[in-house]
Amino acid sequence: MDIKIPTVAALAAEGKVPEILFWVGCAGSFDERYKNVTKAFVKILNKVGVDFAVLGSEETCTGDPARRAGNDFLFQMQAMANIQVLNGYGIKTIVTACPHCFNTIKNEYPELGGNYQVVHHSTYLQQLINEGKVIQKGAEPAFKGRKITFHDSCYLGRANNIYEAPRKVLEALDAELVEMKRCKTKGLCCGAGGGQMFKDAEKGNKEINIERTEEALETQADTIAVACPFCMTMMSDGIKNKEKEGSVQVRDLAELIAESEGL
Amino acid sequence: MTIISQVIFTVILGIFGFFIAKRVNFIRLNIALGRPQKVVGNKRQRWKNVLLIALGQKKMFKKPVPAVLHLLIYVGFVLINIEVLEIILDGVLGSHRIFASLLSDFYAPLISFFEILALGVIFSCVLFLLRRNVIQVARFQKPEMKGWASLDGNLILVIEIILMGAILSMNATDQLLQEMSNAAYPLTGSFLVSSWLMPIFDGYLPSTLVIIERTAWWFHIVGIFGFALYVTYSKHLHIFMAFPNTYFSKLTPKGAMEPMPEITSEVKMMLGIPVEGKTTPPPEGFKFGARDVSDLSRKNLMDAYTCTECGRCTAECPANLTGKKLSPRKIMMDTRDRMEEIGKGRSDAKGHDEKFLLGGFISKEEINACTSCNACVEACPVLINPLDIILQLRRYEAMEASGSPASWNAMFQNVETNAAPWKFSPQDRFNWSEELKNKK
């Protein structure tokens, strides 16, 4: 398959506006592990043939980590600059694989003049499945007999009440979905939100991601599905800490879909 | 004789009424220390929250056992107040069981129903005492629950048991006196629960029974007045505050932080974006974020008076679960304690103490440990938002005090210079596309 990754700027030069902007996010652009999620999602978008584009090097941090750490000046600077770019290109719909970018653009950009329809990739993937564009019914189920547990991202779940979309995506894979003791509204944070990703934890008796990893391992699942770059890092570190890399994988929803599609 | 007791009763009612009103006003002024907030949006949704969450206790039922026990006390409290109304009327008017003649045949079943509720209250309070002190449910054993907080919780339960005991003793002796055809105790019919207690008082002289009945009556009603006053000093204030608090709670998604429009014009000027419309300069005394309770919003402060220290927030907090100092419940308790302190000093040097909420009560170590996961907000049965306070304190540290952790300052710098929280070159942002294309 010839992968196309159009940029919004290139389309604008032809006088076009993409139907969907794929907001990659900093982790999706720079983090070695999460770049794989970006690539998987782009492969899916290519397969489906949707009219999408990315900002490429014009994209910058949404300002979320600065805001959660208390620096609202920096947040507003970032947000305003991004809104200028997005509005300048006439962007209407944004899809992103990062719940933090999703939350900020959806809930915090409107008050600064940025109004878009913002969709998290879990919801978007669910739509594609519902429309029969990926995972056609009757296809060989790639994950049959496998146990998957889903780790709720706080910024998807409690922050935005998205609990079902990622689970529907996993159910479509025909795997056995097993829930952790704490899930959905009671889901335990991976430990990285609110700026924690960018500093060491305060003194305590345990790391949060270890606590969460232990819960995930209790389910006996062979795959921990995540839908957030920070959760990906924290859960992967947890699995490494428990020396379970050989038997348990941490995968993003888009990666699982891409795998089942043979992409 | 009755005139004297009527006067005494009315005076006691007045005295308690006065002190309760004084205390309510004190609390009102404390909440008014906060920033006024516009209440925007959807009255329907707000009333729905009051009905479902405060009145209907919807969020309590995430934990069914305490929810049912709590419901018994709550229903008992609300409905037995009808009998308290009767007692107050009797006290002021010098009547005895004024509703008996009004309700005739319905009176005994009604009182019997209240007695069943009273039994339910006693049952629940005993179990709650066991949960706190014998089973020692973890959320009641945290460091912030030492001393007064723990005593307060136990006192409330004990007082409720004693008050319910008084009502049942009063009714039992009343029935005995009725059976003796005492003129002051007209026949009402038998009461379901207290009739079982009559053998305890059997064999006493009628004059002794009258003394017991009157003592229980006075003890019960003065106890209720005292309890009502006590509540205003206690964490138990949630019985009233839950209603306005659920009404005023935010309706936007939990993930949305409170906006900070005061700095937007400045940011626009820095970016060279034209500022439309007239700009209002930040109000006097405006701080970037919150250092003290007066920098917080009135809803934040109302939250603090609503908190009944149940600790569901702390039990769900990932930082607390893993041994960090942060406890969302302590954030609320500290906020209330600080308000009380400022309120008490209101008459003398206002704001002249050297203490602040941040630093004096809540440490940086606590607020820095928060993952902003909203578990505390989700857990609260009465829509208190500890996270909102934590994030405002962080704003103060970052924007006024330059007190953020060094690694956050480094992250800020990365965002500023590299447009990403990590130290990567902005030119490399799109490298993944080449990697993807070249692989295939």
Image: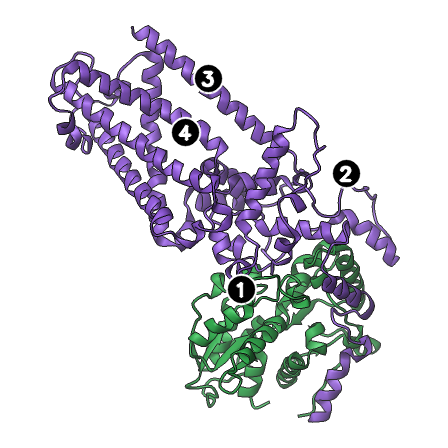
Q: Residues at badges 1 and 2 in contact (C-beta under 8 Å)?
A: no
Instruction: Work out whether residue B369 or residue B419 is closer to the camera in this orientation and state it.
Output: B369
Instruction: Work out whether residue B278 or residue B268 is closer to the camera in this orientation and state it.
Output: B268
For label 1, the residue is A205
Counting residues from the start of the chain, the first of labels 3 and 4 encountered is: 3
Q: Which chain is green?
A: A
Compute the Cα span from label 4 to label 1.
41 Å
Residue B159 image point, x, y percent = 36, 33
- Asked which secondary structure carries label 4, the reply is helix
Q: Are marks 1 and 3 on the same chain?
A: no
Tint applied to chain B in the drawing: purple
- Asked which secondary structure carries label 3, the reply is helix
- Can residue B273 be seen in the rendering of this structure? no
Counting residues from the start of the chain, the first of labels 2 and 3 encountered is: 3
- Asked which secondary structure carries label 2, the reply is loop
Residue at position x 65%, y 42% in the image: B297
Mark 1 or mark 2, which is nearer to you?
Answer: 1
- Can residue A55 be seen in the rendering of this structure? yes
Chain letter for mark 2: B
Disc assigned to residue B285: 2
Compute the Cα span from label 2 to label 4.
39 Å
Q: Residues at badges 1 and 3 in contact (C-beta under 8 Å)?
A: no
Tell me: residue B234, above or below residue B172: below
- What is the total number of numbered labels drawn onto the structure image? 4
Residue B27 image point, x, y percent = 57, 31
Chain letter for mark 4: B
Residue at position x 32%, y 47% in the image: B130
